[in-house]
Image (cartoon, rainbow, N blue to C red):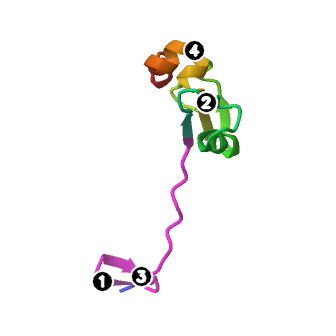
Amino acid sequence: SGSSVGAKGLRPAGVSNMTQVPPRKRDVTLAIFMEGTANPIDQVTTQIALFSRICSGTPLRPDQVVVPMCPTPGDYKLSFNGCGVSHGLRGTLFAHGLREQVN
């Protein structure tokens, strides 16, 4: 008949249970790195900055990010300084600036 019935239903004759299915390709991958309070992202002082540096995604600037309806396929990354770096004492003591980073 050209098909056999196995535990998972019909499959073409000659196809084993071990057939590999290729992984589904992702169109867009976005990695986001958020440094701790007093740490800059452009200097490697923590693992977060190190991971941001070695990530192969195309860097996006947080102040210029607009999410298009149909983004160009690829890998991208957003990296943020700690709030103390971007917003001084208010950022260090009160996390001022965090809302801007997560919106």
Q: Residue at x 54, y 14 (%)?
A: 89
Q: Residue at x 58, y 26 (%)?
A: 38
- Residue linked to disc 2: 39
- Residue linked to disc 1: 5
Q: Earlier in the sequence, mark 2 or mark 4?
A: 2
- Inspect the image, locate mark 1, and give the three-letter code of the amino acid beneath it: Val
Question: Which mark, residue 88?
Answer: 4
- Residue linked to disc 3: 17
Examine the image and state in which quarter residue 70 appears. Answer: top right
> What's the magenta region?
3-29
Q: In the rendered view, would you say 40 is above or below 76?
A: above
Q: Secondary structure at mark 3?
A: loop
- Inspect the image, locate mark 2, and give the three-letter code of the amino acid beneath it: Asn
Mark 3–mark 2 distance (CA, rounded to whole Å): 51 Å
The crowding category of the residue bearing disc 2, from other C-alpha atoms within 10 Å (few below 14, some 14 to 19, many at least 20), is many
Would you say residue 18 sits in the magenta stretch? yes
Q: Secondary structure at mark 1?
A: strand
Q: Quadrant of the C terminus?
A: top left
Is label 3 or label 4 in front? 4
Say left or right for 100 vs 41.
Answer: left
Mark 3–mark 1 distance (CA, rounded to whole Å): 11 Å
Q: Earlier in the sequence, mark 1 or mark 2?
A: 1
Q: Secondary structure at mark 4?
A: helix
**Relative image position of residue 94 (x, y in whole percent):** 44, 17
Q: Earlier in the sequence, mark 3 or mark 4?
A: 3
